[in-house]
Amino acid sequence: MNVIRFSDLCAQGKASGQRVFIRADLNVPQDDNGAITEDTRIRASVPCIQMALAAGAAVMVTSHLGRPTEGAFTPEDSLAPVAKRLGELLGREVPLLANWVDGVTVAPGQVVLLENCRVNVGEKKNSPELAKKMAALCDIFVNDAFGTAHRAEGTTYGIAEYAKIACAGPLLAAEIDAITKALAQPQRPLVAIVAGSKVSTKLTILKSLSEKVDQLIVGGGIANTFMLAAGLKIGKSLAEPDLVDQAKAVIEAMKARGAAVPIPVDVVTAKTFSADAVATVKAAADVADDDLILDIGPQTAAALATQLKAAGTIVWNGPVGVFEFDAFAHGTETIARAIADSAAFSIAGGGDTLAAIAKYGIENQVGYISTGGGAFLEILEGKTLPAFEILQKRAA
């Protein structure tokens, strides 16, 4: 994917003395008192800011936070806690500027944080008037917010249309490189794990991947629907019987390419959905009418682990069981450790997937952990993200 990279501009000295506008993703969770409870996104945004400061640029950074109403700023919408944490990480004060659309004063070597961009009228609908005003604030626009790359908004698309130079920051560039390596130029065999509660939410992803991958592993409620499609009983497990034909179509599409959707041969069941429910391992053909399938069985997990260890590329989105309950976490843990042990290039994304990675402590053994939930899913669907599209146009 051909985009201008901010790192190249800095290396060439083209950012020195320039006004640099960075769209970061600083949308972090907060408690009821407004205190930040998890700062991964802020820490991930620091390298781009440091790169701009080291290059001698005058640096402006903005982000959305929460779901504010345009034109109606409230204290809860403020990036003040983010400015404080960013200042701690950068080792310098980071002034927070409100009402910044019509002008920002910042000198080379300085950094300011621009208040919540989604409060600006016209941001969500990508108003050309707003985009032109923001573009006039800078010499270089840097998109470093993959988590919003699937949205065509003022600070993710519009400003990139009108800025003198529009480029990808290091975080966004790393996402582009990982996605290209995993999906556009993968080492074979390419194995995808798609799990979740519903086929309906991931049907387009399953269809898109069925045209690309060598193995399509399904888990969670999605696997239950595929088990129905394979003629197996699933008791009272979560499933979507009305989408069985769609599941069969995915299975047939894979089969036509000499690929496969492995159907579980054993499962872990319970009579109730609870952390202290009694877990019973049984053959997939022996599921009773009052059973809930809450995990794949050890035989299935071992077979999938063998496939993953032999893979060339692995794409992972979703745990294969109710891993939050220890009795039903074995399948997800087995898969996580197989990915960690595999020589394959692996890319993982999605909130539950990241929680599983953290639970099993394999962060350093996954090739790339994507920072964007919705954007990652749209990439898997085969969609072109608006932020990528405009950066490619500006690089042409």
Image (cartoon, helix red, strand yellow):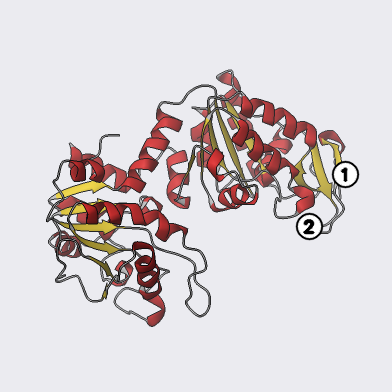
Residue 161 position, x and y percent, is: 18, 51
**Does residue 299 appear to the left or right of 343 in the view shown?**
right
Q: Identify the image quadrant of the N terminus.
A: top left
Q: Tag on residue 359?
A: none
Q: Residue at x 54, y 22 (%)?
A: 189
Q: Amino acid at mark 1?
A: Ala
Q: Residue at x 84, y 34 (%)?
A: 285
Q: CB under 8 Å between callouts 2 and 1? A: no
Q: Amino acid at mark 2?
A: Phe
Q: Is residue 303 above or below residue 367?
A: above
**Does residue 80 appear to the left or right of 370 in the view shown?**
left
Tell me the distance, in whole angstroms, between the alpha carbons under discs 2 and 1. Answer: 15 Å
| Label 1 Cα neighbours within 10 Å, binned few <14 / some 14-19 / many ≥20 | some
Residue 357 position, x and y percent, is: 59, 47
Secondary structure at numbered mark 2: loop
Q: Identify the image quadrant of the C terminus.
A: top left
Decide which of 184, 82 is in the foreground and name it: 82
Mark toward the start of the polypeptide (2 vs 1): 2
**Residue at which label 2 appears:** 273
Residue 91, by quadrant, is bottom left
**Residue at which label 1 appears:** 288
Instruction: Tell how many labels.
Output: 2
Secondary structure at numbered mark 1: loop
Residue 214 position, x and y percent, is: 56, 24
Q: Is residue 282 visible?
A: yes
Q: Is residue 265 visible?
A: no
Q: Residue at x 41, y 69 (%)?
A: 67
Closer to the observer: label 2 or label 1? 2
Q: Residue at x 81, y 35 (%)?
A: 284
| Label 2 Cα neighbours within 10 Å, binned few <14 / some 14-19 / many ≥20 | some
